[in-house]
Image (cartoon, rainbow, N blue to C red):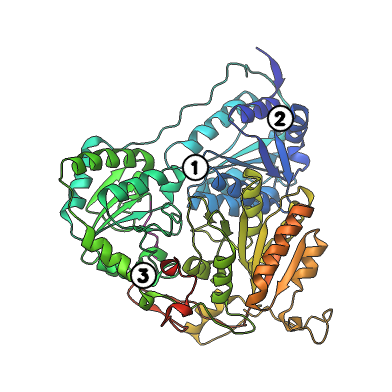
């Protein structure tokens, strides 16, 4: 067999497993890997400005395209700890990424050597597997096992920690006959599918809940097919948004405490049967179990056995990959339809559609305020952006309002870290999406604090020519935390505003603090500031022109009124509306149900 350094074998395994690019920051303890990458030449590299940013770029890369696995690289010590947030975010949303860290030599691991931290132990709770490889001959097999684990069962991240002497050791390895290990995914049986369809058929007002597992399994078309065969309405979760187009007649809204539609919650409350596929009954979707489950029966399909019954016990549970389950459900549903056994759902579908099409269930967006209300910004986005737009967002009032007002039509066109929600995620994730798909129209969405958290990563977009549009809604506040503080009658330590001495006295944004336009330009990108709704469309046109010319990110900063409370509540039957509701079509002209 051929002799090579262990790290050279690792790079060749990466290529065999389909890796074509990595995101990272080099350092002394991981330089052997960088030397091997340079010598090999087949794997590209994007240099992040912060190692956490590299982990989120890897997330964005994975989330953007079915089958992708993002790779992030860092040196020993703080590089690994910096990437823990990315591993947590990936683990929480069942996203496979591979984190590779350098480490001190084996002989010095117990001597408190410089940057010699036990990163495998630290990462254990936020990965499927975290290991420090101590035997050089095990290096290629550790990578083989990593890809096997990331693809099998519930997807998730892996961390491989490599002492520098292990990387440099010579081993024998035959890469020519190397083959990836087959992935294991549990699959629903025919008998389980028949029981599930029978239970649904016995109900009067059923709903399908489509979760992020449907997108992870690349099974959105099957989800829509099942809904159409059964003629049963669909409520996607936030992570499943896009599994069914927003303008599909069977898409009847999202349900939840924050990222939801009024008609979606009303339709959920009117149902008597909920068939969840690839979802996890997250508390932001359900509110209290008592309200969510009262008067309803449930089926839960999940790839992870321990997810079933974790939040509440369903009436029937099936452990299965979403795609494998949907294939069985579609086959049974087709047979039942051909045999005339399926119930007619026309009245129930019409009832759900009626709520979606009623002004009574819409929130007002057509405000003329200056500074702007965020609702008007999302109306402008709906009017300006097309149905192929991919949105990238993380957390905050910007994300919550975005989910309430924007429209998504395709899977992987809403890319969001759902459970972890780390501030700063949006910018590096959007860059990862761009690397994964150079042609896609990408619009990131951030509040000012999310934007400031990892703003330095914009320089990555400038250096590596990764253009995308970043809509920054700026109220100079930690808006979501400010709104939560209302329960404590405080507005404390959440204001980002200060009088910026470098801005003109007459500048309307002088009191908003950070001059984002100058910071963005200093990082090698372009930016434009919008004060009025009528200026948004021209700003988007300018952004498109700048991206075509310069191939860099472009930030559109929308100056908002300082305080706007966004609809949310503690129960799906008690969401508080802080702003005016629509009373006529002109109040919500871009609302999906009213589009011709």
The quadrant of the rendering that contains the C terminus is bottom left
Q: Residue at x 57, y 55 (%)?
A: 390
The answer to whether residue 462 is above or below residue 170 is: below
Residue lying furthest front: 596
Residue 287: x and y, percent? Answer: 36, 68
Would you say 585 lies left or right of 318 here? right
Residue name at image x 32 percent, y 41 percent = 325
Q: Nearer the viewer, mark 2 or mark 1?
A: 2
Q: Which range is magenta? A: 279-283
Query: Is residue 328 placed above or below 354 in the rendered structure?
Result: above
Give me the C-alpha separation between circle 2 and circle 1. Answer: 27 Å
Would you say the residues marked 3 and 2 are in contact, meaning their CB atoms lie under 8 Å apart?
no
Q: Which numbered disc flags the more N-terminal residue, 3 or 2?
A: 2
Whether residue 241 is visible to the viewer of this picture, yes or no, is yes
Can you tell which mark lies on residue 128? Answer: 1
- Mark 2 surroundings within 10 Å by alpha-carbon count, few (fewer than 14), some (14 through 19), many (20 or more): some
Nearer mark to the viewer, of 3 and 2: 3
Measure the alpha-carbon separation of dots 3 and 2.
52 Å
* Secondary structure category for the residue under label 1: loop
Name the residue tied to disc 2.
Answer: 42
């Amino acid at each position: 067999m051929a002799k090579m350094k262990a790290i050279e074998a690792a790079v060749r395994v990466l290529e065999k497993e389909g890796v074509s690019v990595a995101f990272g920051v080099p350092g002394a303890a991981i330089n052997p890997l960088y030397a091997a990458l340079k010598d090999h030449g087949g794997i590209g590299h994007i240099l992040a400005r912060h190692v956490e940013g590299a982990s989120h770029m890897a997330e964005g890369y994975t989330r953007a395209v079915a089958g992708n696995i993002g790779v992030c690289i860092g040196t020993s010590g703080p590089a690994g700890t910096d990437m823990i947030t990315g591993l947590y975010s990936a683990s929480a949303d069942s996203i496979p990424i591979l984190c590779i860290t350098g480490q001190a030599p084996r002989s010095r691991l117990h001597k408190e050597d410089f940057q010699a931290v036990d990163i495998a132990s630290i990462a254990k709770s936020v990965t499927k597997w975290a290991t420090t490889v101590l035997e050089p001959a095990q290096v290629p097999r550790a990578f083989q096992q990593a890809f096997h684990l990331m693809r099998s069962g519930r997807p998730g991240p892996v961390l491989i920690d490599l002492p520098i002497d292990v990387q440099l050791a010579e081993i024998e390895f035959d890469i020519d006959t190397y083959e990836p290990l087959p992935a294991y995914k549990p699959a629903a049986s025919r008998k389980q599918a028949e029981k599930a369809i029978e239970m649904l058929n016995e109900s009067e007002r059923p709903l399908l809940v489509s979760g992020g597992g449907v997108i992870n399994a690349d099974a959105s078309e099957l989800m829509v097919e099942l809904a159409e065969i059964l003629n049963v309405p669909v409520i996607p979760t936030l992570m499943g948004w896009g599994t069914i187009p927003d303008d599909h007649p069977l898409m009847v809204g999202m349900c939840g405490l924050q990222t939801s539609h009024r008609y979606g919650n009303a339709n959920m409350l009117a149902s008597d049967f909920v068939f969840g596929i690839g979802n996890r009954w997250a508390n932001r979707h359900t509110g209290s179990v008592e309200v969510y489950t009262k008067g309803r029966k449930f089926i839960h399909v999940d790839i992870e056995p321990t997810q079933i019954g974790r939040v509440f016990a369903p009436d029937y549970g099936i452990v299965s990959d979403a795609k494998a389950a949907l294939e069985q459900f579609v086959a049974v549903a087709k047979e039942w339809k051909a045999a005339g056994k399926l119930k007619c759902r026309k009245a129930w579908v019409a009832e759900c559609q009626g709520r979606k099409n009623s002004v009574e269930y819409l929130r007002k967006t057509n405000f003329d305020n200056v500074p702007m209300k965020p609702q008007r910004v999302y109306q402008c986005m709906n009017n300006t952006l097309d149905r192929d737009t991919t949105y990238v967002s993380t957390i905050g009032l910007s994300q919550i309002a975005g989910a309430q007002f924007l429209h998504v039509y395709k899977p992987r066109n809403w890319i969001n870290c759902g459970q972890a929600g780390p501030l700063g995620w949006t910018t590096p994730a959007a860059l990862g999406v761009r690397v994964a798909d150079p042609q896609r129209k990408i619009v990131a969405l951030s509040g000012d604090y999310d934007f400031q958290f990892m703003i330095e990563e914009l320089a990555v977009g400038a250096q590596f020519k990764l253009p995308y549009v970043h809509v920054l809604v700026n109220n100079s506040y930690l808006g979501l935390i400010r709104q939560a503080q209302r329960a404590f009658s405080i507005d404390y330590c959440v204001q980002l505003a200060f009088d910026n001495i470098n801005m003109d006295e007459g500048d309307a944004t002088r009191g908003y603090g950070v001059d984002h336009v100058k910071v963005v330009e200093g990082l090698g990108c372009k930016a434009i500031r919008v004060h009025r709704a009528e200026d948004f469309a021209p700003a988007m046109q300018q952004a498109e022109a700048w991206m075509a010319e310069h191939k860099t990110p472009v930030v559109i900063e929308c100056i908002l009124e300082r305080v706007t409370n966004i609809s949310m509540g503690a129960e799906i039957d008690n969401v508080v509306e802080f702003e005016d509701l629509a009373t006529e079509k002109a109040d919500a002209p871009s609302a999906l149900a009213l589009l011709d």
